[in-house]
Image: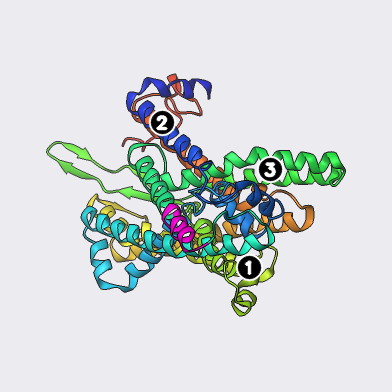
Amino acid sequence: MASGFGNIPKIPELRKRLLLTLLLLAIYRIGVFVTVPGVDRNVMKQIMSGASGTFLGLFNMFSGGALKQLSIFALGIMPYISASIIIQLLTVVVPHLEQLNKEGEAGRRKINQYTRYGTVLLCIIQGYFMATWFESQNRMYPGLVLGAGLGFRLMTVLTLTSGTIFIMWLGEQITERGIGNGISLIIFAGIVANMPDAIIKLYRQFHRGDMGILNLAIIVFIVVAAIAVITFFERAYRKIPVQYAKRVVGRRMYGGASSHLPLKVNMAGVIPPIFASSLLMFPAQIASFTDSDTIRRFIQPLSNPADWRYNLVYVTLIIFFAFFYTAVTFNPKDVADNMKKQGGFIPGIRPGQRTAEYIDRVLTRITWGGSIYVSLVCVLPNLMQARFNVPFYFGGTSLLIVVGVALDTVQQIEGHLITRHYEGLGGGGGKGGPRIRGRRPA
């Protein structure tokens, strides 16, 4: 492992990508501590002190602690994720967007532009509700807002919208010029940055006697077991055997090799819980920022992670987005056509439409298993909160995001190392060859 990481500086492109990624993440973390004009962050810390396990605690976690700091990044990246969900759903039903999606890179750039416009619109709406909520909290916590009024609301909307757009730009730069998925890494950085504080809170509970040694041991066991389960499932594949037909060109024979088509059990990765949390946050945010008792009574159960109705909707959304995102990113028909063009076939399955149907059937089955696994892991924080009163950052949702994003980023780094003929991060180079092996020659 040490020698694998030692090979990273030897590749100039990889070194530049890693340094750029770290620099942009550092800029994001610095911006978390830049306060919105006209508010007092110390008063906000009092409000957030008892918000662990609630909607505000979940919102603060996904914003990387920016809400607690009343930062210009308080909205986080969630408006961009919500806009992406809306645009992707509209792509299925709107012919113009569906046509753009089929036009390749040019069409995707146009769809990304629409997503940015939608992000600005959602930021304006959420920013206004957040500004009015700040003013409403000023009655119970005097001094939170220094000068309430229309000017404060406009300034807050402008500041929060600009902050989210800047985060969106940082994420896109990381994706294009850095390592890993930029949006996921920004959420990852926010969660990891707040984990030391969660460990300190857990230690204080144990030191005060609020938590026994047995409960602490159970929590540690659950966290370690959750990390092990996440690692196992994120690296799990269903391998479909593929045989390539032999062909004679001149006096040489080509093909005849055996390979496999790897299908990840959790092909959607950490996207389903992020999308599901984003959708649950939006109505809950509006309900918490309004004075209407009717809206609050209707949406209140969906903003309480300890409520069974919240968990039911959360699991349903995770399963839906697991299938939806897998369908968007993986097309069995295209895979079957490419396989047929290369002379490949699945033993016992006719090439073409039958192969596409077989791959789709296998993919559906493993996606069911993957979505149920993600759902069970993400419900874990609610059970831990209710039973042990532990910090929210040790919940399944945050652990899934942290471990999933870390594995994806390490896999991309390892891919660069293997491509440049270095051994992978897990070792295994030298005489035995790299740890990740390609298809065996015929």
The amino acid type found where label 1 is placed reads: Tyr
Q: Front-most of 298 and 392?
A: 298
Q: Mark 1 points at which residue?
A: 310
Position of residue 428 measured from the top left corner of the image (x, y, whole percent): 48, 25
Q: Which residue is drawn at 34% across and 63% down?
A: 356
Look at the image and tell me whether residue 82 can be seen: yes
Cα separation between marks 3 and 1: 24 Å
Q: Is residue 76 left or right of residue 140?
A: left
* Residue occupying the point 46% across, 30% down: 435
Pointer 3 and pointer 1: residues touching (CB < 8 Å)?
no
Q: Which residue reaches farthest bottom? A: 294
Residue interval drawn in magenta = 149-160
| Residue 198, above or below 267 | above
Residue where numbered disc 2 is placed = 18
Left or right side of 374 for 244: left
Badge 2 amino acid: Leu
Residue 235 visible within the image: no
Q: Name the residue under label 3.
A: 198
Q: Label 2 neighbourhood size at 10 Å, few (<14), some (14-19), many (20+)? A: some
Instruction: Say what secondary structure mark 3 lies in.
Output: helix
User: What predominant SS class does the magenta segment belong to?
Assistant: helix
Sequence-first tag of 3 and 2: 2
Tell me which amino acid carries mark 3. Ala
CB under 8 Å between callouts 3 and 2? no
Q: What percent of the width, then of the height, locates residue 252?
A: 17, 36
- Number of the front mark, 3 or 1: 3
Q: Residue furthest left?
A: 250
Residue 289 belongs to the span the image colors magenta: no
Cα separation between marks 2 and 1: 38 Å
Where does the C terminus fall, quadrant-wise?
top left
Q: Is mark 1 on a helix, strand or loop?
A: helix
Magenta residue check for 156: yes
